[in-house]
Structures are given as structure tokens and as C-alpha cells.
Image (cartoon, rainbow, N blue to C red):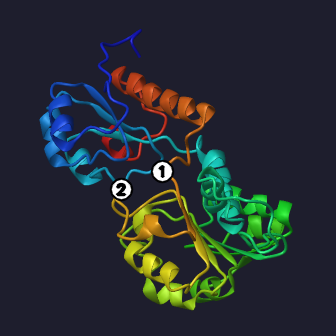
């Protein structure tokens, strides 16, 4: 980007505070944002009328007020596609780590508590030949579901629309939400965060799941009512959970971090060298194209280009 423009980079390896963001965007012609940066009318106005584009360094864009941006003629972009494999693989890492109690047993060893092999120590769950439930069979959900073949799993899914092609390719079965909750041994969420998917998993849904079920969320934190999940894990309504995202990041619901039957990691699903570089290239390319007067690669409010 510096070949074409003057560039100022956030010097911190963290998200800017709201106040820092409002100050940093002033007078900019383009801004690359993180998913944690809420870009609303106030931020757009702080940037000024010369600002042409806000490019999200993420596939999600629920942090963008698209109506406000479109009304001001500001292009909004994201980075879809390049993080699908990394996120799908990460969801599997969470599933396996939760099922086999990897984090819990590693903490045990590091605390110098291990005194030798024991037949009942850290008994986990098999993954092979179980039923895998997938909520949301989009790009990431589809890649996640395909990997189930390695474990000879039965795949069931629900989505806004059926995916006959994938059903034929991997033998996935479309079911309603109630069936998904009732039959899944492992349930992985791959839904976008929309008003209708907020708290997609709450107290009522958790009560419908198997007591041996494991919930995985590497999509968006507010898909799960985190307080209800803490209660369900504590009371063993379900067996465990693996979480990459949280409802009020970086804060966790009270009591969540104290539970041994949950694996919690800090929103790192796309954190591979190859994926983060690819995301950066797309975001930078979108900025360069827009400032040249060209259509960016991944515009999410294309009406501003007309």
C-alpha cells in the first residue's frame, strides 16, 4: 500500500479503543478496520466526506452500519473465502480438544499433578462414528462438514436453504433445528450473526441436547447465550463446549473460565500465517482499487458503486 499512498498503522497489537478509533480515522481517504471496530455514523462522520472506503480485515461485517455507509457513499468491504479452511480446521481442533479433554489434562501436567498413568484419568469421548450436527452450511460450514468423513461420522445439518450438492457428495441429511439439537453428539455453529440468529443456542435449546453432547462455536459469540451455557455446563446439561468466540469479547460470562468442561481460546480461528496474509492482501487490494476509482474485489454494499 505504501507504493501508492501514505499509510499510518496502528502501533499496538490490539484493537483501538472507541476514542482512539474516532481520532485515528480523521481526514483519512481509506480505513482498514478490525471486526471489533464498530463503524457507525459517528465514525464515518469523524473520518470526513473525503473518505472513500472502510475495508474490514475479517469476513464478518456485523460491526458495519451498512445503511449509514451507503447513505454517505462510502464503500464497505470484507475478506471472504480465504479464511474458510483455517476456520473449519480450527473448529475441528476445538471439537477434538473438548472431546479428549486436551486443555484440562495439559493444565494438570503443567501443574505437576501427574503422578503416573491411571485407568480412569481424563476419560473423554470417541469422535468416530458419532453424529455431527452443523448449524449453517455455508462456505465454512461446508468445509467443516466435509472433514467429518475422516471420522466416519453421520452428518446432519440445518440452514436457511438446503444444499443438495453437498448432501449427495458427503451424505449429509437436512433436518429441522429441533432434530439437530436432539440427535447431535457434536453440534458446531457456522451461522452469520443476524437478529434471528442471536442466541440461537439458549437455555431451551441446551435442554433439548443430549447430556453427552458437545457444543462448538467458532463463528460469532452472540449466537450462544453465554450465561445459559455456563449454567448448562456447570449442571452437566451437556457434556462440554469448545469456544473461540464470546458474547462480550474480551470478557467471558461469569464462571465460564472456571469450568473444566469447556475449552476457551481467544478468537484465533483465522490465525494462521497464510490466512492472515491473504486477508491483509484482500483488504489492501480493496483500498488500492477503490482509491483508483475501480470496483473493489469484495464490496458488501455494491449500490454505492452504481
Which is nearer the N-term, disc 2 or disc 1?
2
Front in this rendered view, residue 38 or 45: 38
Residue shown at 36%/47% (left/top)?
A: 301
For this orientation, the residue located farthest to the top is: 3
Using residue 125 as the reference point, say whether residue 56 is left or right of it: left
x, y percent for residue 222: 39, 67
Whether residues under marks 2 and 1 lie with C-beta atoms below 8 angstroms apart, the answer is yes
Q: Secondary structure at mark 2?
A: loop
Rate crowding at label 1 as few (under 14), some (14 to 19) or many (20 or more) other CA atoms within 10 Å: some
x, y percent for residue 175: 66, 83
- Check residue 93 in the rendering and tell me which mark sits there, or answer none: none
Residue shown at 48%/47% (left/top)?
A: 59
x, y percent for residue 93: 67, 55
* Figure disc tally: 2
Q: Secondary structure at mark 1?
A: loop
Q: Which residue is mark 2?
A: 249
Quadrant where the C terminus sits is top left
The answer to whether residue 306 shows anywhere in this view is no
- Give the answer, above or below, for where 53 lies relative to 135: above
Using residue 6 as the reference point, say whether residue 231 is left or right of it: right
Quadrant in the picture for residue 178: bottom right
- Give the answer, above or below, for where 111 lies relative to 34: below
Using residue 268 as the reference point, say whether residue 185 is left or right of it: right
x, y percent for residue 13: 38, 32
- Check residue 267 in the rendering and tell me which mark sits there, or answer none: 1
Front in this rendered view, residue 68 or 24: 24
Rate crowding at label 2 as few (under 14), some (14 to 19) or many (20 or more) other CA atoms within 10 Å: few
Mark 2 and mark 1: Cα distance apart in space: 9 Å
- Give the answer, above or below, for where 184 lies relative to 50: below
Amino acid at each position: 500500500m505504501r507504493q501508492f499512498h501514505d499509510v499510518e498503522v496502528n502501533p499496538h497489537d490490539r484493537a483501538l479503543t472507541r476514542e482512539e478509533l474516532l481520532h485515528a480515522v480523521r481526514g483519512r481517504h481509506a480505513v482498514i478496520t478490525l471486526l471489533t471496530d464498530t463503524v457507525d455514523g459517528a465514525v464515518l462522520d469523524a473520518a470526513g466526506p473525503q473518505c472513500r472506503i472502510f475495508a474490514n480485515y475479517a469476513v464478518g461485517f456485523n460491526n458495519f452500519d451498512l445503511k449509514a455507509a451507503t447513505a454517505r457513499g462510502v464503500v464497505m468491504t470484507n475478506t471472504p473465502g480465504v479464511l474458510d479452511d483455517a476456520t473449519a480446521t480450527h473448529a475441528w481442533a476445538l471439537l477434538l480438544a473438548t472431546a479428549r479433554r486436551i486443555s484440562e489434562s495439559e493444565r494438570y501436567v503443567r501443574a505437576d499433578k501427574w503422578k503416573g498413568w491411571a485407568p480412569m484419568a481424563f476419560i473423554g469421548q470417541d469422535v468416530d462414528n458419532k453424529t455431527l450436527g452443523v448449524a449453517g452450511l455455508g462456505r465454512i460450514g461446508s468445509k467443516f462438514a466435509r472433514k467429518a468423513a475422516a471420522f466416519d461420522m453421520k452428518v446432519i445439518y440445518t440452514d436457511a436453504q438446503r444444499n443438495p450438492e453437498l448432501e449427495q457428495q458427503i451424505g449429509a441429511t437436512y433436518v429441522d433445528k429441533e432434530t439437530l439439537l436432539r440427535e447431535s453428539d457434536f453440534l458446531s455453529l457456522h451461522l452469520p450473526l443476524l437478529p434471528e440468529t442471536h442466541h440461537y443456542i439458549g437455555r431451551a435449546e441446551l435442554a433439548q441436547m443430549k447430556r453427552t453432547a458437545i457444543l462448538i462455536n467458532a463463528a460469532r459469540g452472540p449466537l450462544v447465550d453465554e450465561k445459559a451455557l455456563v449454567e448448562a455446563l456447570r449442571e452437566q446439561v451437556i457434556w462440554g463446549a469448545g469456544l473461540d468466540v464470546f458474547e462480550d469479547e474480551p470478557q467471558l460470562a461469569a464462571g465460564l473460565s472456571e469450568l473444566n468442561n469447556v475449552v476457551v481460546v481467544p478468537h484465533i480461528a483465522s490465525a494462521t500465517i497464510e490466512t492472515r496474509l491473504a486477508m491483509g492482501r484482500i483488504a489492501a487490494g480493496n483500498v488500492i482499487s477503490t482509491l483508483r476509482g475501480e470496483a473493489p474485489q469484495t464490496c458488501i454494499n455494491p449500490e454505492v458503486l452504481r
